Image (spheres, rainbow, N blue to C red):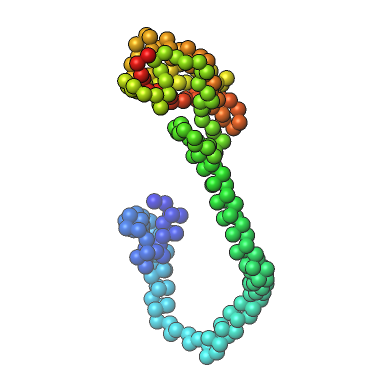
Amino acid sequence: MNCRAAKRLLAGYLDGAIRPADRIYVREHVGSCPNCREQLERYRRLAVCLAHVEPAAPPVDLAVRIRLTAARSSSRAGWPLRMWRRATLVFENILEPMALPATGGVLTAMVAFLFTVQGILVGVPVGVIQNDLPTSLMQPARLESLAPFPVTGITDVDAHGVDGVLILEATLNEQGQVVTYVILAGPSDPGVRRQLDQLLLFSRFSPQLSFGRPTAGGRVVLNWVLVRG
C-alpha cells in the first residue's frame, strides 16, 4: 500500500470504520512510513480535542422554522399535484357514467362472437340422422331416392318373410355419386354385392355441403330387410 491510498484510510482506521483487510494494510504501512504515522497522530489529537468540545445548543425556534420551510416547499411543489387531482376528478365524472354501458356492449359482443364461432366450428354434425334438419353451415349427405326398379332379394322394411338385415355405409363424392361402400351388417356374398352395385348406381343422393358448396367424403347409412326372392 502506498501513501496516497493509506492517507484516504487513516481517518477510518482511527474510527474503526474500514474493512479488516484494509486495517491490516494501513497498520503495516504506518509502521514503516513516518509521514503517514505523523498524519495518523494528528487525526488522533484532533479526535481528542473534539471529544472535549461542548455541543452547541440549537436555537429555540429551530423546530418552528423547519416546519415553516417544509410547509412553504410543499405549497410551491403541491400545485401540480392539485391540478392533477382536479383533472382526474373531472375525467372520472365524465367517464364513469359511460363505463357501464361500454362494458355491457363489449360483453354482449364477446358473447355473440362466441356463439357464432360455436355455430361454425362446434356445430358441425358428427353423424347422419334420418329426417334431421341441419342447423349449422355443414350439411350431411343424404339419400334422395332409391333406384325406381325392383332388385331381387332386397326390399323395403315393410316387406314380409324376413330373413335378415343388411346395413351398409356409402361414401359419396362432390357430385353425390357413390364411390365406395362398406357392409356393416348382413351378407356380403358376390350376389348381394352385384345387386347393391346396381341399386346404388341408379339411386340419387345429395352430397355433403360445406358452407353451401358440395364436398366429397359425405357418408350415408342404408339398411334393408332381406327376404326370400
Image coordinates for residue 153, horizontal then vertical, percent: 39, 15
Q: Nearer the viewer, residue 102 or 60?
A: 102
Q: Quadrant of residue 22?
A: bottom left
Q: In this view, which residue lies farthest toward the front?
A: 160
Quadrant occupied by the C terminus: top left
Residue located at (58% from left, 79% from top) = 70
Image coordinates for residue 208, horizontal then vertical, percent: 54, 27
Residue located at (59% from left, 32% from top) = 211
Residue located at (36% from left, 24% from top) = 160
In this rendering, the answer to whether 205 lies above or below 211 is above
Image coordinates for residue 173, horizontal then vertical, percent: 53, 19
Residue located at (35% from left, 16% from top) = 228
Q: Nearer the viewer, residue 69 or 74?
A: 74
Q: Quadrant of residue 193?
A: top left
Q: Nearer the viewer, residue 177 or 214?
A: 177
Res 31 visible: no
Image coordinates for residue 43, horizontal then vertical, percent: 41, 68
Q: Nearer the viewer, residue 175 or 27?
A: 175
What number of labels is visible?
0
In this rendering, the answer to whether 115 lies above or below 91 is above
In this rendering, the answer to whether 137 lies above or below 94 is above
Res 115 visible: yes
Task: Tell me: 81 left or right of 11.
Answer: right
